[in-house]
Amino acid sequence: MDILFLGTGASVPSRDRSPPCIALREGSDMVLFDCGEGSQRQLMISPVSFMKIRAIFISHMHGDHILGLPGLLQTMGLMGRKDPLLACGPTGFSAAVSSFLDACEGGIPYELGLTDMCGGDSVDMGGYRISAFEVEHGVEALGFVYEEESRRGLFDKRRAEELGLRPGPDFTMILNGETVRGVSPAEVIGPSRPGLRVVYSGDTAPCDTLLEAAEGADVLIHEATYASCDSELAAMHGHSTAAQAAETARAAGVKALMLTHISNRYDDPSVLEEEAKQIFGSTRAVRDLDMFTVSAKGVRSV
């Protein structure tokens, strides 16, 4: 799985940071979390194609998280998109997007499924599931969990050969769940392995629902709008500090923490990264167009 950070800024963009937008890609399949202003241009200069997006999930209705969506939807139509697209967000999302598209008088020439979600709702994407949970931001706001289906256990080639199986058709059949030459799959294939889990906080103050959703995640993508020196502002506006994000990551037992939604008041985001690393070592403060590959072995920069 690849994670591409298209926009890592907060409410006010800067020359270095666009409003929030994150792409998760598995093979040719891609979903977006949030779609701030300018997201389609970020997609155009990135190594991924926005025509491959299957679904878009909007965390809440603040402008920095949704104002890029109508333009992206229309551009995909102008570029000849035919594949259906799912777009989900909190209560009122479907009506708001429909009204905006009607006002623009630009038809969408592909099937657009607009869906409102609440905490506890989920969407089966075939091979993985996107689940929503409520967070605390002063307005109705969601975080999301991207969770792959369990993966097949590891194949013990040496044991298979010892039991008389031959490379080629024998291996193919037993990996497909068939008993071959009296050997059952359970004899040469280990227990199923959990799929990857990536959790996106959206905008939120520290909360129990996020802590619960993030438990054991491979990656927690957490907003870090403020440094601890501005903790009063964070509390006032329903945001988190980098240290609070790190505390959540540590308590949830995640494998890696990625900080995003960084205020333009901080010229050097390493201040936030260092603050978080004092609490949770496996932390990165990400920048626009940073891309990472996530696997069972860990996270690496692309």
Image (cartoon, rainbow, N blue to C red):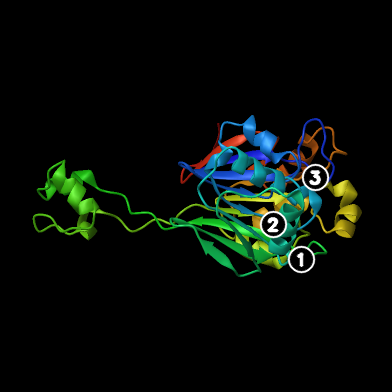
Image quadrant in which the C terminus is located:
top right
In the structure shown, which secondary structural element does the residue marked by tag 3 occupy?
Answer: loop
Q: Amino acid at mark 2?
A: Thr
Q: Secondary structure at mark 1?
A: loop
Q: Earlier in the sequence, mark 3 or mark 2?
A: 3
Amino acid found under the numbered disc labelled 3: Ala
C-alpha distance separating marks 3 and 2: 20 Å
Rounded to the nearest angstrom, the CA distance separating label 1 from label 3 is 18 Å
Q: Position of residue 22 (x, y in %)?
A: 64, 44
* Residue 35 is at least partly visible in this image: no
The picture places residue 3, in percent across and down from the top left corner, at: 58, 42
Q: Residues within 10 Å of mark 3 (few under 14, many from 20)?
A: many
Which labelled disc corresponds to residue 248? 2
Dot 1 or dot 3, earlier in sequence:
3
Which residue is under mark 1?
A: 140
Q: Are marks 1 and 3 in contact (CB under 8 Å)?
A: no
Query: First in sequence: mark 2 or mark 1?
Result: 1
Name the side, left or right, on which 280 lies relative to 224.
left
Q: Amino acid at mark 1?
A: Glu
In contact (CB < 8 Å): disc 3 and disc 2: no
Establish if 158 lies above or below 237: above
Spatial CA span between label 2 and label 1: 21 Å
**Horizontal arrangement in the rendering, residue 194 relative to residue 91 (left or right):** left
**Residue 130, quarter of picture:** bottom right
